[in-house]
Amino acid sequence: MNSNVKSILCASLLVIFCNVVHAEIAVIVNLANTDAIKKESIASLYLAKTRTFPGGKNAIPLDRPEGSPIRVEFISKVIEKDESQMKSYWSRLIFTGQGVPPKALESDAEVKEMVARNPDAIGFIDAGAVDSTVKVVATF
């Protein structure tokens, strides 16, 4: 293989790898949800500081499994914490009886299905998995 072909192949793999590592995260809600939701409101929901959308309707945040790449990125970008800080945060809330962490769903498809069925749900998925069954309120 000549050096030009190797260089092109390496560059292509690097572009693909970077796109996978830095995939955009879409925060999604049910199509019936009309609230404008800012980053601060999303963070408050995922930290159990509030239990309602800005318009006052009940909110049910859906999480992803601890350690999953999308959750690590979401926590970093939206909540501005890392996994260990989040674990510590929830341990304190659980211990004091002040909250329970959001239910964790395994896949984008599961989150999307739950959000599409429940007008109170909010979740986050890879932006590439968004379709017409849900509404994107923010991307990170």
Image (cartoon, rainbow, N blue to C red):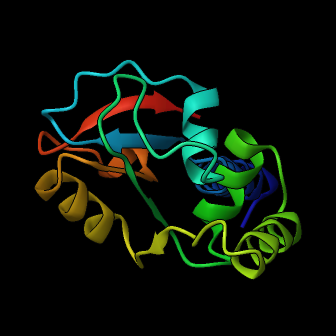
| Residue 44 placement, left or right of 127 | right
| Front one among 57 and 24 | 57
The quadrant of the rendering that contains the C terminus is top right
Residue at the far front in the pictured view? 97
Question: Is residue 5 in sight in this rendering?
Answer: no
Residue 63 percent across, percent down from the top left: 50, 65
The quadrant of the rendering that contains the N terminus is bottom right
- Tell me the quarter of the picture where residue 105 sits: bottom left
| Front one among 58 and 131 | 58
Question: Is residue 20 in sight in this rendering?
Answer: yes
| Residue 57 placement, left or right of 70 | left
- The structure residue drawn at horizontal position 57% and vertical position 72%, both measured from the top left corner, is 100
- The structure residue drawn at horizontal position 46% and vertical position 29%, both measured from the top left corner, is 138
- The structure residue drawn at horizontal position 26% and vertical position 48%, both measured from the top left corner, is 120
| Residue 44 placement, left or right of 59 | right
Residue 86 percent across, percent down from the top left: 78, 65
- Tell me the quarter of the picture where residue 97 sits: bottom right
